[in-house]
Image (cartoon, rainbow, N blue to C red):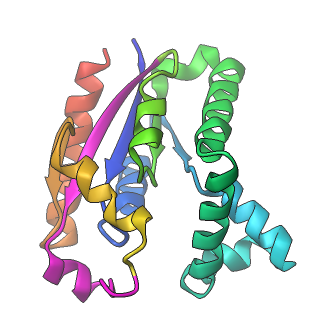
Amino acid sequence: MKTPLIIPIGRSKSGKDELYKIVKEYYPDYEVVRFSFADYLYELTAETLGISLEEIRKEKEKYRHYLIFGGMFARKINPNIWVHKLEDVISQYILSNKRYLDKTIFVVTDCRFESELDSLCYIDGVEPLTVSIRCSKETLESRGYNFTNYNHESETLVDNITTVGCSFVIPNNSSFEKYRDEVINTVGEILEICK
């Protein structure tokens, strides 16, 4: 059995982090582990600004411009900086927890670039499966998404990934309960594939 690596793809406020929370709650017999390309960026930004990591996470919108600038700057130096960091983190987790991987589900909550997606497909021992989370423009706006403020490539390029090649599609335009049910059904299918 390969360890499922669920990769929700969608714009901010589409429900990627919510997918992780639903899986963690609904599958208590599994170790559900969240990974993020941005974790290291958050750490570097907090250190640079002299604030706590908790402050950045709590007030993400307030620090969004710093995060975007830091991410772009680091990618200019090394286009795969975040990719290599996350590959190392996941590989270390796998090495340290080999005995328990048959009851583990990995979720990467912020895959936004094709290079990031490509890198996740080559990690030994995992079965990467993409889940396109589809939200209408109206739904995103009702959740506070501002298309003018969110026009950075980390938002716009994700549309290229969601339109082709995703293993599963989950609509997220109605109630939380309906979305939760869609997530639970999809993850059930994913676990069957990984057996």
Q: Quadrant of residue 88?
A: top right
Within the magenta stretch, is there residue 142? yes
Residue 156 point in image, percent of width and height: 32, 65
The one of 84 and 43 positioned closer to us in this rendering: 84
- For the C terminus, the quadrant is top left
- The residue drawn where x is 46% and y is 54% is 110
Q: Name the quadrant of the N terminus.
A: top left
Report the residue at 59% width, 80% height from top.
65
Q: Relative to 36, is 156 on the left or the right?
A: left
Residue positioned 32% across, 52% down in the render? 9
Question: Residue 27: in sight, yes or no?
Answer: no
Question: Which percent across, then down, holds residue 8?
Answer: 34, 49
Query: Is 8 colored magenta in this rendering?
Result: no
Position of 37 with respect to 129 (left or right) is: right
Image location of residue 35, percent across then percent down = 55, 46
Q: Is residue 31 left or right of residue 178?
A: right
Instruction: State the image quarter where residue 142 is shown.
Output: bottom left
Q: Is residue 29 above or below residue 185?
A: above
Q: Is residue 143 left or right of residue 103?
A: left
Q: State the image coordinates of residue 6 (x, y, percent, origin top left).
A: 37, 38
Up the image or down, 71 lies above or below 77; here it is below
Q: Magenta segment range? A: 126-149
